[in-house]
Structure formats: structure tokens, C-alpha cells
Image (cartoon, rainbow, N blue to C red):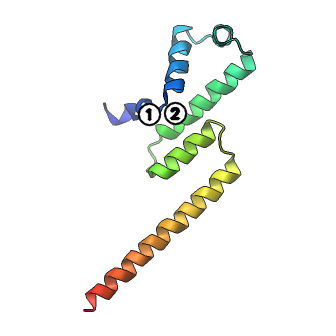
């Protein structure tokens, strides 16, 4: 698959099943609500979350696996924005510390 279709590969089975039903319902949220036995606003929320997740997965912005997964969880409503920010900040600091330690180790080796 080309890079532009990578987002499809990142969706879980539940998201793909929802997307398939959405297409088969010709995009009718009312029909989808009836098929799932849930309210229209609930279907709308599910679709909005799926759209947000696809936008994260399809982003051309370079991001690592950790950031992609955590942003996907937030889009899915399983993480709130404040928690996402805390996790991404902590991860960035960890990466910077690991990079600094690797550089310090490399400079010690070059002095031998």
C-alpha cells in the first residue's frame, strides 16, 4: 500500500467495521444509529472520533509510534487532552535524556 493509505492499516477492527457499515448505509447516520441500536448523537460522536483518529494517522507530520498511539487514544476519547500533553512532555524529556546520555557516552569513547 502507498503511504497515503497507511491510516487504514492503523485502524482497529472495530473502527473498520464501523467504517464499513457507514459506507454501506450510504453515510446515513440515522440508518447507522438504527443498525447499532443507539442514538443519533452517539453515532455522531463515534464518527467524530473516527475522523479525528484518521486525521492523526494520516498526518504528514513526522511523529513517532508513541505519539501516534497516544494521539489516537485521545481522538478515540480514551485520553483527555491534559493527560496527552503530560505523556508527550514526559516522553520528549525521556528521549532527550537518552540522546544526551548517548552523546556523553560517545564523547567518552572518543577520548580513549
The disc placed on residue 19 is none
The residue tagged 1 is 7
Element at badge 1?
A: helix
> Which one is in front, 5 or 16?
16
Point 64% across, 28% down: residue: 48
Point 55% across, 35% down: residue: 53
Asked where in the image residue 112 lies, by quadrant, the reply is: bottom left
Q: Position of residue 59 (x, y in %)?
A: 47, 41
Quadrant occupied by the N terminus:
top left
Q: Is residue 9 above or below residue 82?
A: above
Q: Is residue 71 above or below residue 46?
A: below
Q: Is residue 38 left or right of residue 16?
A: right
Asked where in the image residue 25 lies, by quadrant, the reply is: top right
Q: Is residue 47 above or below residue 69?
A: above
Point 66% across, 37% down: residue: 77
Element at badge 2?
A: helix
Point 63% across, 8% down: residue: 35
The residue tagged 2 is 54
Q: Position of residue 15 (x, y in %)?
A: 53, 26
Q: Position of residue 95 (x, y in %)?
A: 47, 66
Kindly check if marks 1 and 2 are in contact, taking CB atoms under 8 A apart as contact: yes
Seen as rendered, the residue at the extreme bottom is: 112
Q: Residues within 10 Å of mark 1 (few under 14, many from 20)?
A: some
Q: Residues within 10 Å of mark 2 (few under 14, many from 20)?
A: some
- How many callouts does the rendering have? 2
Q: CA distance from mark 1 to mark 2?
A: 6 Å
Mark 1 vs mark 2: which is more N-terminal?
1
Amino acid at each position: 500500500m502507498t503511504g497515503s493509505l497507511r491510516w487504514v492499516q492503523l485502524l482497529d477492527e472495530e473502527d473498520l467495521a464501523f467504517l464499513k457499515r457507514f459506507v454501506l448505509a450510504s453515510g446515513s447516520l440515522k440508518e447507522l444509529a438504527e443498525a447499532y441500536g443507539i442514538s443519533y448523537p452517539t453515532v455522531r460522536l463515534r464518527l467524530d472520533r473516527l475522523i479525528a483518529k484518521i486525521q492523526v494517522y494520516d498526518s504528514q507530520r513526522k511523529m513517532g509510534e508513541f505519539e501516534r498511539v497516544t494521539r489516537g487514544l485521545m481522538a478515540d476519547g480514551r485520553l483527555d487532552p491534559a493527560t496527552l500533553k503530560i505523556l508527550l512532555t514526559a516522553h520528549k524529556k525521556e528521549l532527550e535524556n537518552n540522546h544526551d546520555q548517548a552523546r556523553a557516552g560517545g564523547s567518552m569513547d572518543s577520548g580513549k
